[in-house]
Image (spheres, helix red, strand yellow):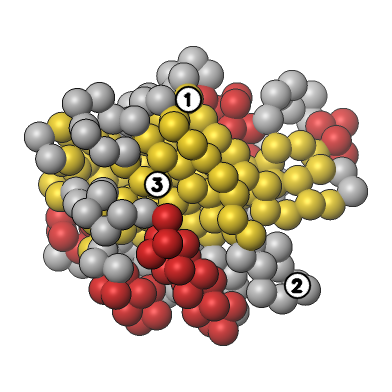
Amino acid sequence: MRKLRILTINIHKGFSWSNRKFILHRLREAIRSVDADLVFLQEVVGKNSAQAEKHSNWPDQAQHEFLADPQWKYFAYGKNAFYPDGHHGNAILSKFPLLHSEQIDTSTNSFEQRGFLYCAVNIPGSPVPLHCLCIHLGLFAVSRRKQLRMQADYIGRCIPPAEPVIMAGDFNDWSGRCVNDFAKILGMKDAATEAKGRKARTFPARIPFLPLDRIYFRGLTAKSSATYYKGVWKKLSDHAALFIESELP
């Protein structure tokens, strides 16, 4: 068995939950402290020239590159939303080589630009790649259902059924019914539920009581689960971070 440490967090474009402070540097230290093998990030700014002019400590590189350096040698970024000053989207940071990555557009209406980032990861000693999907679903239930169908179609077409999959991110779904049905169809399980017997509560980060952020597995076993919103994580994003320690055969 190989142990894999996995973290997911919606970084709120590098701003505090109240949008008053640019806290990307503090967030980098918090993420580094966990020393995860794979980090799934949502609302990552690839470029924003207007915000760069306002904040003297805005990094010269894209946010995912700033967060990755020097701990995660491999990373991928997928643009979701485009606007005059730049763009933001999803990112995956990895300690292992990436064999392939692509961003899949799952926008379903004119109000939201959405998508998921796919990466195939080369895990040393594994005969097959580890398939990773970084998710950020829409705010409307009807959109989420359509997006989940798109993801199911992609997984069914592009990923062999016997190969391991991690699907992690911000599902924007507090009831969990739609996502749970989707996961069962694909043979996936909620990692926090497997480790602790219940879904992880991650929103709002000040007092988390809604399970918006999830990690789903196929072909891995969840051994422990933790939600980070205190200590170094306090007053960072509006979402708490979700951490899972797992085993991959």
N-terminal of the two: label 1 or label 3?
A: 1
What is the CA distance from the residue labelled 1 to the residue labelled 3? 13 Å
For numbered disc 1, what is the local secondary structure? Answer: strand
Q: Give the percent coordinates (x, y) of residue 31.
A: 43, 32
What is the CA distance from the residue labelled 1 to the residue labelled 2? 32 Å
Tag of residue 132 = 3
Q: Amino acid at mark 2?
A: Phe
Label 2 Cα crowd, 10 Å radius (few <14 / some 14-19 / many 20+): few
Q: Quadrant of residue 105?
A: bottom right
**Image vertical order of residue 35 relative to residue 140, above or below:** above
**Image vertical order of residue 125 relative to residue 5, above or below:** above
**Image vertical order of residue 90 relative to residue 105, above or below:** above
Label 1 Cα crowd, 10 Å radius (few <14 / some 14-19 / many 20+): some
Q: Quadrant of the N terminus?
A: top left
Label 3 Cα crowd, 10 Å radius (few <14 / some 14-19 / many 20+): many
Q: Amino acid at mark 3?
A: Cys
Q: Quadrant of residue 39?
A: top left
Callout in the foreground (1, 2): 1
N-terminal of the two: label 1 or label 2?
A: 1
Q: Residue at x 60, y 26 (%)?
A: 65
For numbered disc 2, what is the local secondary structure? Answer: loop
For numbered disc 3, what is the local secondary structure? Answer: strand
Q: Quadrant of the C terminus?
A: top left
According to the picture, the residue beneath numbered tag 1 turns out to be: 74
